């Protein structure tokens, strides 16, 4: 189970208190009625579904209830950092590399099996 | 390919089993193929098999970055059923179910399809109404599904606790008798052997790192860790990694990848005669021929490629299993694992052409792709061979998320899958 740092409560809490809430840094369209079907599809249905470093929204549902943003590696599930909603993407160059070589998935450890 | 038969077993028994051949070869990749399939799971190998068998295309490579059948084909709970609500879904899943019946003979490989019945438990009046609606819709589509009283359910599955004081009381069940299980590894191996016999190259440990395009935008081939391989047509059948591969061709997909977990118990004598699913308390369970109870849990709540999943997800399912089947409370769980499933917004698959000419995609099976393996492979092969969908998979386009013609099993599936 993950421990997630809530930037509002300023403490690490169990994953059970949180809910993932989609991609971060996406501006909701202001001209919904004038959008073409292609634009609506791109906003509403299509996802980058990144393997590796991704920026996403989380909500501390069973805590303070507030939304915040997180930088997470979707291979190791490691949170690189969390930050308050509305702040720009943090500079991650000072943090650890996105996908660590030590991730022990079955895929990583057994892919050379015949 | 030497045919498997009772005579072959007898012959090999007489000479110390020295005459068995390798089931498929591992050839060096050619410079060019007519069709490349990315992903050697059941759906991908099956696609190659039906391309060779029904469409006469044998110059095919199936590329696999890991080992054959090592993705979700080897990680699921092997449940087969076709009692989906909507006509489109009923069409494709029942096409698969008809192919399951006879697949062992077709492939000359025992996939151990066992129509032992899939029973879905109803715990409240809402479940009852939804299941009865499914039963009527299924029967209009010619798919068997019937309503059982709690007593009939108990008779069909004796370990079930139907007492009125149960934590999750049961007020009936829906039963699809043609549903059941199959041996998941055997499905991949059987398709691999039959496809290789028809000349298909199965190339393992070959990871696709790029999709090459012609100046006119059409597909030219793929880059791999074993060099460039050209092809006129490329089919992506990569489950949870579909988004990653399609991004190489510049196509964004309506997919999110989640870990989905399953687990097995220690093996015991035959006790559990069917498959039981409970949507409301989220549990599915059956018993394998080895004797292990095979239990399916839910997806994690957040997207991930980790192939593990949280412990709280499987304990949640075991809580439900222990309440439904008190007899299993003291059993030990032996192994658990996760697979990465690709979930679409409407929980229906995508088997279609893409905006890139010569590039085809078979994905979005979410948490329930195993049951569809033969049907999916069969119509996807048709789509690639003819550059046009079969009428069964025609509704499962990529464009439906633009037109709004969704096949909304998200709200209608008989189980949260």
Image (spheres, coloured by chain):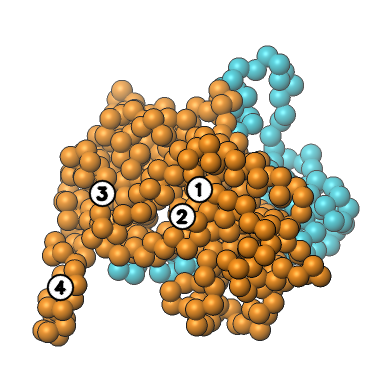
Chain colours: A cyan, B orange
Which badge, 1 or 2, comes first in the chain's sequence? Answer: 1
Q: What is the secondary structure assignment of the residue under circle 1?
A: loop
Q: Position of residue B250 (x, y in %)?
A: 45, 34
Chain bearing tag 1 is B
B272 left or right of A34? left
Q: Are marks 3 and 2 in contact (CB under 8 Å)?
A: no
Chain bearing tag 2 is B
Chain bearing tag 3 is B
Residue visible at 47% across and 40% down? B142
Mark yes or no: residue B366 visible.
no
What residue does disc 3 label? B49
Residue visible at 65% across and 17% down? A35
What residue does disc 1 label? B144
In the foreground, B141 or B197:
B141
Which badge, 3 or 1, comes first in the chain's sequence? Answer: 3
In the foreground, B72 or B93:
B93
Chain bearing tag 4 is B
What residue does disc 2 label? B178
Residue visible at 33% across and 43% down? B378
Mark 3 on the same chain as mark 4 = yes
């Amino acid at each position: 189970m993950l421990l997630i740092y809530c930037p509002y409560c300023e403490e690490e809490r169990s994953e059970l208190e949180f809910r993932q809430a989609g991609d971060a840094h996406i501006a909701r369209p202001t001209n919904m009625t004038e959008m073409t079907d292609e634009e609506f599809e791109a906003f509403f249905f299509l996802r980058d579904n990144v393997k590796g470093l991704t920026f996403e929204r989380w909500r501390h549902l069973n805590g303070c209830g507030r939304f915040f943003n997180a930088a997470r590696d979707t291979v190791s599930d490691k949170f690189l950092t969390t930050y308050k909603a509305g702040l720009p993407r943090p500079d991650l160059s000072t943090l650890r590399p996105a996908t660590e070589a030590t991730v022990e998935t079955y895929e990583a450890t057994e892919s050379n099996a015949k | 390919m030497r045919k498997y038969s009772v005579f072959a077993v007898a012959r090999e028994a007489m000479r110390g089993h020295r005459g068995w051949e390798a089931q498929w070869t591992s050839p060096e990749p050619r410079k060019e193929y007519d069709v490349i399939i990315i992903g050697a799971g059941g759906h991908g190998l099956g696609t190659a098999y039906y391309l060779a068998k029904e469409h006469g295309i044998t110059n095919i490579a199936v590329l696999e970055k890991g080992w054959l059948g090592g993705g979700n084909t080897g990680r699921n709970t092997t449940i087969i059923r076709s009692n989906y609500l909507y006509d489109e879904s009923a069409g494709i899943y029942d096409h698969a179910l008809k192919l399951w019946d006879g697949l062992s003979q077709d492939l000359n490989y025992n996939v151990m399809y066992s129509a032992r019945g899939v029973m879905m438990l109803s715990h409240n009046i809402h479940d009852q109404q939804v299941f009865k609606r499914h039963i009527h819709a299924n029967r209009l589509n010619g798919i068997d599904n019937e309503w059982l009283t709690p007593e009939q359910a108990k008779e069909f599955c004796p370990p079930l606790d139907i007492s009125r004081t149960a934590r999750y009381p049961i007020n009936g069940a829906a039963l699809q008798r043609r549903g059941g299980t199959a041996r998941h590894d055997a499905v991949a191996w059987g398709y691999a052997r039959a496809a290789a016999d028809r000349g298909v190259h199965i190339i393992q440990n070959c990871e696709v790192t790029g999709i090459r395009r012609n100046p006119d935008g059409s597909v030219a081939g793929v880059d791999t860790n074993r060099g460039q391989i050209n092809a006129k047509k490329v089919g992506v059948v990569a489950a949870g990694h579909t988004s990653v591969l399609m991004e190489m061709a510049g196509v964004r997909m309506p997919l999110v990848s989640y870990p989905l977990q399953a687990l097995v118990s220690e093996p015991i004598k035959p006790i559990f005669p069917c498959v039981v699913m409970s949507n409301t308390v989220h549990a599915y369970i059956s018993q394998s021929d080895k004797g292990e109870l095979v239990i399916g849990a839910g997806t994690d709540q957040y997207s991930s490629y980790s192939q593990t999943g949280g412990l709280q997800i499987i304990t949640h399912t075991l809580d439900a299993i222990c309440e439904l089947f008190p007899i299993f409370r003291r059993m030990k769980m032996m192994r658990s694992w996760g697979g990465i499933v690709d979930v679409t917004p409407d929980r229906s698959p995508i088997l279609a052409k893409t905006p890139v000419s010569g590039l085809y995609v078979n994905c979005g099976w979410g948490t329930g792709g195993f049951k569809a393996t033969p049907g999916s492979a069969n119509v996807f092969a048709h789509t690639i061979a003819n550059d046009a969908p079969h009428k069964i998979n025609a509704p499962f386009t990529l464009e439906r998320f633009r037109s709004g013609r969704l096949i909304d099993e998200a709200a209608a599936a008989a189980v949260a899958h």
